[in-house]
Image: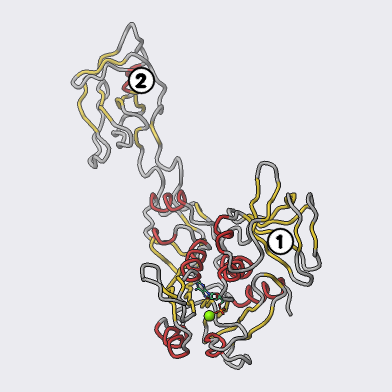
Amino acid sequence: MRSVEEHQRAVADLIQARPPITVALADAEGLVLAADVIAPISLPVFDNSAMDGYAVLADDIVAAAPEAPVKLPVTEDIPAGRTDIPTLTPGTAHRIMTGAPIPHGADAVVPVEDTDGGLDVVQISATIPRGRHVRRSGGDVAAGATVLWARQLVSAPAAGLASALGLAELTVRPRQRVLVISTGSELVKPGTPLAPGQIYESNGVMLAAAVRDAGAEVVGAVTVADDTAEFTAVLDRYGVRDGAVDLVITSGGVSAGAYEVVKDVFGRDGDQGVHFVKVAMQPGMPQGIGRVGDAAIITLPGNPVSAQVSFEVFIRPALRRAMSLPKPDRPRRTAVLSEKLVSPAGKRQFRRGLLDYETGTVTNYGPPASHHLRYLASANCLLDIADEVTELAVGTEVEVWDLTG
Ligand code: AMP
Ligand code: MG
């Protein structure tokens, strides 16, 4: 049996970064930049008003005071978006709105609050220094400056900045393209009545959601019967051998029974490029790993908790690393166990837990058997219990993986 760490390394080696691609801005959000971004223009693009008010020459209103307002004729009205830039004649004012271009010759904006708001003639009751309420071109970004850096996440504000600079595309580390295949002749889609012996499919929906949550792309989430022809047809349909998929995640069909479709297709002895191994963990012992064409293949056990915990332990960190995404690993911390637990010798056990962030205590949530999806569905952490540990007393410090982080 291989250790969890050994299999984590094998999966991390298997899932390789794709070459950078240039994508539309909307598709870049949440990905990591593969190149620095140089500002093609300055921001603000042009001198513009920071206030709704009146563009003036500061020298014209040096005498203004509440008891002695200065009167100026209003000769232009400049809303935001006006594209012809007027020239201010000394001794006049232009009514101007926030974001509108400062007229040539003006050097300050009087906020409307310091005026009577006049449309033909304005009374200004406060003096202001030259330059006040004028946002200068280049005051935020000078053209030619590096504004975003390679390896930086395209956050919402980073996407906003790129758009403000007029950039329609960014060069990023692309998402891993993942095909999820659930196997089992007993599986039925929700919305269809169940015949005796059938169950509703859960792994495909769950793993696809987990893939997206990890930042990768689901190119397909397909359920197939325990039928090798059907399984192979799905690999062909999605172009697994043609470079259209980076990772195939299968669930089920890898046990010791008959009708093990995944083992039957990929070959039990590794000659098809996929090896079936046992990992010293619970749940999730039977794992398969390999390659078909350029696509990485990871085969997960069918029990839903085994499949999902295996995804957390092996696939999520490897996918995030391959995309250079931040926080590839779930945040880990220790917490104080609130009830005693037993754990199998020689296996690293991942139990479902409820972590109380306030008190730093953790409660085991549900039995260890791997069909109890209900508990995992509401757990907020995994308890990570080392291979050699067989008993944990109340009050023991245990390592937990925060599934919300
Ligand atoms: P297997 O590894 O195919 O023998 O499956 C182990 C157990 O997990 C069986 O009880 C299956 O019915 C169940 N199982 C496998 N795949 C799924 C799935 N996609 N959704 C729900 N249960 C599944
Ligand atoms: Mg099965």
- In the shown orientation, is residue 132 left or right of residue 356? left
Amino acid at the residue labelled 2: Asp
Report which residue position mark 1 lands on.
384
Q: Is mark 2 within 8 Å of ligand 1?
A: no
Q: Which residue shows up at 31% across the image and 34% down it?
A: 102
- In the shown orientation, is residue 160 left or right of residue 94? right
Amino acid at the residue labelled 1: Asp
**Mark 1 Cα-neighbour bin, 10 Å: few <14, some 14–19, many ≥20:** some
x and y percentages locating residue 56 in the rendered image:
31, 25
Disc 1 is placed on an element classified as strand
Relative to 64, is 298 above or below? below
Distance (Cα) linking label 1 and label 2: 72 Å
x and y percentages locating residue 161 in the rendered image:
43, 50
Q: Quadrant of residue 94?
A: top left
> Looking at the figure, which quarter contains the N terminus?
bottom right
Q: How is the image coloured?
A: secondary structure
Foreground residue, 193 or 316?
193
x and y percentages locating residue 229 in the rendered image:
44, 90
Foreground residue, 158 or 401?
401
Foreground residue, 252 or 27?
252
Q: Which residue shows up at 80% across the image and 54% down it?
A: 393
Label whose residue precedes the other's in the sequence (1 or 2) = 2
Report which residue position mark 2 lands on.
59
Relative to 152, is 199 above or below? below
x and y percentages locating residue 49 in the rendered image:
34, 33
Relative to 396, is 267 above or below? below
Q: Which residue shows up at 21% across the image and 23% down it?
A: 74
**Mark 2 Cα-neighbour bin, 10 Å: few <14, some 14–19, many ≥20:** some
Q: Which residue shows up at 59% across the image and 89% down it?
A: 273
Disc 2 is placed on an element classified as helix
